[in-house]
Image: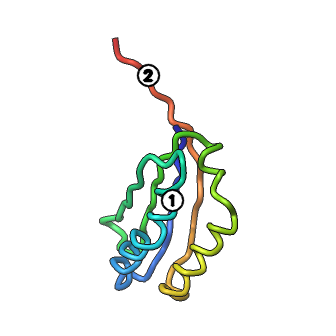
Amino acid sequence: MVVEFLRFTVASELREQFVRLDSDIWTPVLAKTSGFLRKEVWLNSDDPTEVVVVIHWASFEKWQSIPPEDLQKTEEIFSQEMGDTYQLLESKRYQVQTFLQP
């Protein structure tokens, strides 16, 4: 399993709108992709301007199978709705290592 980690900054008064639009716009596009497992949105209790989106994928290859034009179109729609009120601060990829307990 691979985890996509995205950290955003957004105006605190628009945080709930950002989360709602992310769910309405991005999640359906990602969810129809083979290999999508789940998505979580983490809200920082100490910093109301920080939103972290964590997406779990079956594999890196499945994640990367999303056509770039679909990603671009989705970002354009999201950006049109949110305006210039958010910024992607960090984008990382993690490989999940699991250990079996005896």
> Mark 2 sits on what residue?
99
Distance between the Cα atoms at labels 1 and 2? 28 Å
Viewer-nearest residue: 68 or 5? 68
The residue sitting at 38% across, 56% down in the picture is 40
Q: Secondary structure at mark 1?
A: helix
Q: Are marks 1 and 2 in contact (CB under 8 Å)?
A: no
Q: State which mark lies toward you, 1 or 2.
A: 1
Is residue 71 found left or right of 48 in the rendered image? Answer: right
Residue that carries the numbered disc 1 in the rendered image? 30
For the point 50% across and 69% down, the residue is 8
Q: Amino acid at mark 2?
A: Phe
Residue 2: horizontal and vertical position, in percent?
A: 54, 42
Where on the picture, by quarter, is residue 11?
Answer: bottom left
Q: State the residue in front, 25 or 17.
A: 25
Q: Relative to residue 68, is residue 24 depicted above or below?
A: below
Around disc 2, counting alpha carbons within 10 Å, would you say few (fewer than 14), some (14 to 19), or many (20 or more)? few
